[in-house]
Image (spheres, rainbow, N blue to C red):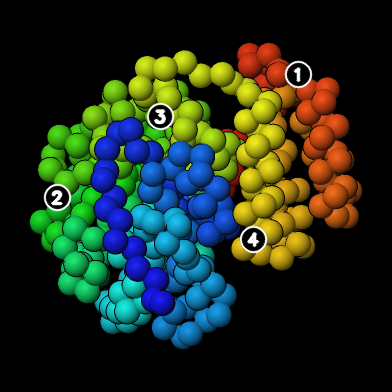
């Protein structure tokens, strides 16, 4: 049976999104986030050229199942013909929701004229956008961008208005310039400006590291929803936690039972969709982040690095939770930073 995603995005502030995250938001991580409260999930950026030249590793990024619907697949590329090919390929494969990466500031992508570099050539970018919308359908394609290439050339408002006019379904703004990378702070006031300027949904991204940040961002900007990125890498339970806070309910944090359940589910989903070696690698990478609000998380990371199999990992984790204590949230010396992850 062919894959189909007929689920609506139903964009609303109590339905948080998982951001596109290169190297992280694969099918396994998306399913995990979904289980822990993400309403909409995004694939990592997929190269349109990679699809055009039939790259196996590129196609692997398109792995999906109806269980994760609604899922958005993000493309990058600045060539109208190649992007049209990629969109055709996705539509024929039953994919429904699409996004164009116009925000990635990584040098390799920027140098090719893709990602955030597209904010420096709006006319071509609009041609690409129109081709995507023509093939994907009006309202089915979103666009994710930053303020502009640098502070001298901020184009976010013009770009938002032109994309709305072209038939964009939604836009996502990470309010930093490409030149800023991840430095400084995200200028949420710019999100509010765009919310006031367009009538399509605006998804807020940028410095949403804790569930409280999401609630604050919605209040300050009036965005249609929030998109968790580094906050989700550190804690896939952030989605449900955010929704709890958004509804005005209280949150127990950190919660050892929930964290144990999260780790267990990550392992099970990894084993369902990947091999044991990949699951082991994922556990070693992700678990230290999930336990960062408990004392001894740095030591646990060292112990995990020496584990050669999943049974060993289970034993180390079990022992950790048997003696775990939450850290004092004002003492950051114990925690593993989530700030320095690069795009
Ligand atoms: C490791 C990593 C990978 C990312 N990959 C992508 C990507 O593939 N496509 C994209 O549009 N943005 C990507 N981003 C940007 C995020 O989606 C998000 O906009 C950004 O991290 C700001 O949100 P935050 O400050 O809450 O983390 C990535 C960010 C990180 C940290």
Foreground disc of the pair 2, 1: 1
Q: Secondary structure at mark 4?
A: helix
Q: CA distance from mark 2 to mark 1?
A: 50 Å
- Mark 2 or mark 4: name the one nearer the start of the chain: 2
Whole-percent x, y for residue 209 in the image: 50, 32
Foreground disc of the pair 2, 4: 4
Report the disc number at residue 272: 4
Q: Quadrant of residue 194?
A: top left
Q: CA distance from mark 2 to mark 4?
A: 43 Å
In the rendered structure, the answer to whether residue 142 lies left or right of residue 210 reads left
Q: Which residue is mark 1?
A: 325
Whole-percent x, y for residue 94 in the image: 34, 72
From this view, report whether residue 214 is shown above or below residue 230: above
Q: Taking the image as drawn, is residue 104 in sight?
A: no
Q: Taking the image as drawn, is residue 339 in sight?
A: yes
Whole-percent x, y for residue 90 in the image: 35, 74
From this view, report whether residue 126 is shown above or below residue 299: below
Q: Which residue is mark 2?
A: 161
Q: Quadrant of residue 331?
A: top right
Who's the residue at 85% across and 55% down the image?
309
């Amino acid at each position: 049976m062919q894959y189909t995603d007929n689920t609506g995005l139903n964009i609303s502030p109590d339905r948080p999104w998982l951001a596109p995250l290169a190297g992280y938001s694969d099918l396994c991580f998306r399913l995990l986030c979904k289980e822990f409260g993400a309403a909409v999930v995004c694939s990592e950026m997929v190269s349109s050229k990679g699809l055009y030249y039939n790259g196996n590793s590129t196609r692997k990024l398109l792995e999906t199942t109806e269980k994760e619907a609604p899922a958005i697949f993000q493309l990058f590329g600045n060539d109208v013909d190649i992007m049209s090919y990629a969109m055709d390929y996705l539509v024929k494969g039953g994919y429904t929701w699409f996004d164009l990466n116009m925000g990635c500031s990584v040098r390799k992508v920027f140098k090719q004229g893709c990602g955030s570099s597209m904010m420096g050539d709006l006319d071509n970018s609009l041609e690409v956008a129109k081709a995507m919308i023509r093939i994907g359908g009006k309202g089915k394609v979103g666009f994710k961008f930053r303020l502009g290439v640098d502070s001298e050339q901020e184009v976010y408002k013009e770009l938002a208005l032109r994309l709305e006019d072209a038939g964009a379904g939604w836009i996502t703004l990470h309010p930093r310039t490409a030149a800023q990378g991840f430095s400084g702070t995200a200028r949420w006031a710019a999100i509010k400006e765009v919310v006031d300027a367009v009538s399509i949904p605006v998804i807020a991204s940028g410095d949403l590291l804790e569930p409280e940040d999401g609630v604050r961002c919605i209040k300050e900007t009036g965005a249609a929803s929030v998109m968790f990125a580094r906050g989700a890498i550190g804690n896939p339970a952030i989605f449900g936690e955010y929704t709890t806070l958004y509804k005005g309910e209280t949150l127990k944090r950190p919660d050892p039972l929930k964290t144990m359940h999260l780790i267990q589910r990550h392992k099970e989903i990894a084993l369902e969709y990947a091999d044991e070696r990949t699951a082991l690698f994922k556990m070693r990478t992700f678990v230290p982040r999930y336990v960062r609000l408990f004392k001894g998380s740095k030591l646990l990371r060292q112990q995990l690095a020496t584990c050669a199999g999943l049974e060993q990992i289970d034993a180390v984790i079990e022992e950790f939770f048997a003696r775990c204590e939450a850290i004092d949230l004002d003492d950051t010396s114990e925690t593993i930073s989530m700030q320095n992850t690069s795009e």
